[in-house]
Every structure is written in structure tokens, then in C-alpha cells.
Amino acid sequence: MLKVILFDIDNTILSFDEYVKESMKNGFNKFGIGVYKEEMFDVFTKVNNNLWHAIEKGELNFAKLQKIRWNMIFERLGITADGEAFEKYFREYLFNSAIHVDGAVELLKYLYGKYVLCVASNGPYLQQVNRLKVGGILPYFSDLFISEEMGCAKPSKEFFATCIERLNSKSEEKILPCEVMIIGDSLTSDMLGGMQFGMQTCFYNPNSKLVPEEIDLTYNVTSLKEIKDIL
Ligand SMILES: [Mg+2]
């Protein structure tokens, strides 16, 4: 039986991609480093994903990522600019950004009251909480599992174990990992992490990415709307 749903935040309920495009467009203008073009977003995504995978593997930490991310992106784009200064702007801009993923609010409304809803996110605590607040969706969640505050990140066993522990400390009935579902857009941090801990998994897969055989998903959906038909 399903009792609890853990929602990833970025690119699952709040669009990180749209925010990045918006901040690059405005930031390039503000920093006087030329005109933003759509293909530049792909460079950002590639560099950023590689850095986050290194964090997931424990090879990098978030503080270091902030030092190198935009310098790496600018280098690839052939742009001469201060990457650390741009990072600061980028993060300040992110603090108040809350562009909903299509269908996110409708889904939360539908699930609220049926299940215990929580977020499970790798990121800075105050920023993620503020974005949920700005986006008007904070009240749907009964707990916020955010890596910075927990001192561990998805997909580590420690992260998911802490979620279960905290859920049980507030619940009269014991909650088992198999009664928890994680919904997210990352195969590595959300799906693999949840699966290895014995949770149900729902892959939000809007680009219909191929799923490697070793990742045994419970559900694979291309829109959040589909989740309403499943749950
Ligand atoms: Mg995500």
C-alpha cells in the first residue's frame, strides 16, 4: 500500500530548465557578455549534469561546483567573463524562481489528503524552501527532505534512511520503504536511489529517455498528468 510520496523538486515540480534559460538571457544582458542563444542552454546542461554526477559519486562538493561551474561553461562557449561573479548572480536569481512544471499544481492538489506528500531534493535548504513558497506549493508538503540540511544527498542510502526515520518519528503506524514512492526526473539520484532502498519509483520522463535494464522502475510517465491516472 502506498502511504507517502517523495517529490524531487527541480525539473519535477519546478522547472529548472526554464529558470536557467531566463537567468542566462537576463544575465548575459546584465553582464554585457553578448546575446543568449538557445543552443547555449545545452552547454549549460551538459556541464551542470556532469558536475552533479560527480557530486552524486562523492567526487565533488557543492561549494566547489559553485566555484567552477560558470567558468567551465564560459570556456566552452568561448566567452570571457567572471564565472564566479556570474554564479553568484545565477544563485540569487534562482532563490526566487518558481516556474511550475506543467501539471505540477494540479497533481499536488489531487494527491493532497490521499497521501503524505514530502519533497526530497539535493540543494540548498533556504533556497528550495523559498522557491516552494514563492511557487505557492509549500503548504502541500508535510516534510522537506533537503540535502543541505540533512548532511547527505540522494542517491545515498543515508539520505533515504533518514527520510524513513523522520517519517516514522511523526507517524503512529510504521511506514516501510515499500509504502513510499519517489517521483523524479533523475534516473541516478531519484530512481536508482529509491529503488535500491526498496521504494516504489515513478520516473518523470518528458523526453522519453531510454531506461537502462538494470533500473527496474515501478512507473515511467511522460507527463505529470499521467500520474493522476495511476494513483
Ligand atoms: Mg530533478
Image (tube, helix red, strand yellow):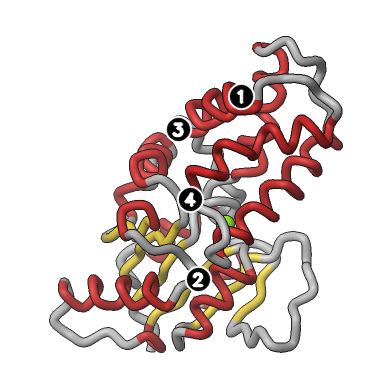
> What residue would you read off at disc 1?
86
Label 4 residue SS: helix
Q: In the rendered view, does 177 fall on the left or right side of 142?
A: right
> Which amino acid does the dot numbered 2 rest on?
Pro
The residue nearer to you, when weighing 72 against 3, is 72
Q: Nearer the viewer, mark 3 or mark 4?
A: 3
Residue type, numbered disc 4:
Val
Residue placed most toward the observer, 155 or 111: 155
Which quarter of the figure is the N terminus placed in? Answer: bottom left
Image location (x, y in percent) of residue 59? 57, 61
- 58 or 155, nearer to the observer: 58
**Which is more foreground, mark 4 or mark 1?**
1
Residue 60 lies left or right of residue 211; in this view the side is left
Q: Are marks 3 and 4 in contact (CB under 8 Å)?
A: no
The residue depicted at 35 percent of the width and 75 percent of the height is: 4
User: Which residue does the numbered mark 2 point to in the structure image?
Assistant: 155
Looking at the image, is mark 3 or mark 2 earlier in the sequence?
3
- The earlier-in-sequence mark between 4 and 2 is 4
Determine the residue positioned at 51% across, 32% down.
91
Between marks 3 and 2 in the image, the one whose residue lies nearer the viewer = 2
Q: Are marks 4 and 2 in contact (CB under 8 Å)?
A: no
Q: Which residue is mark 3?
A: 95
Q: CA distance from mark 3 to mark 2?
A: 24 Å
What amino acid type should be assigned to the residue bearing mark 3?
A: Phe
Judged by depth in the image, the label closer to the viewer, 3 or 1, is 1
Q: State the SS at label 3.
A: helix
- Where does residue 93 sit, x and y in percent of width and height? 52, 27
Residue indicated by mark 4 = 105
**Cβ atoms under marks 1 and 2 closer than 8 Å:** no
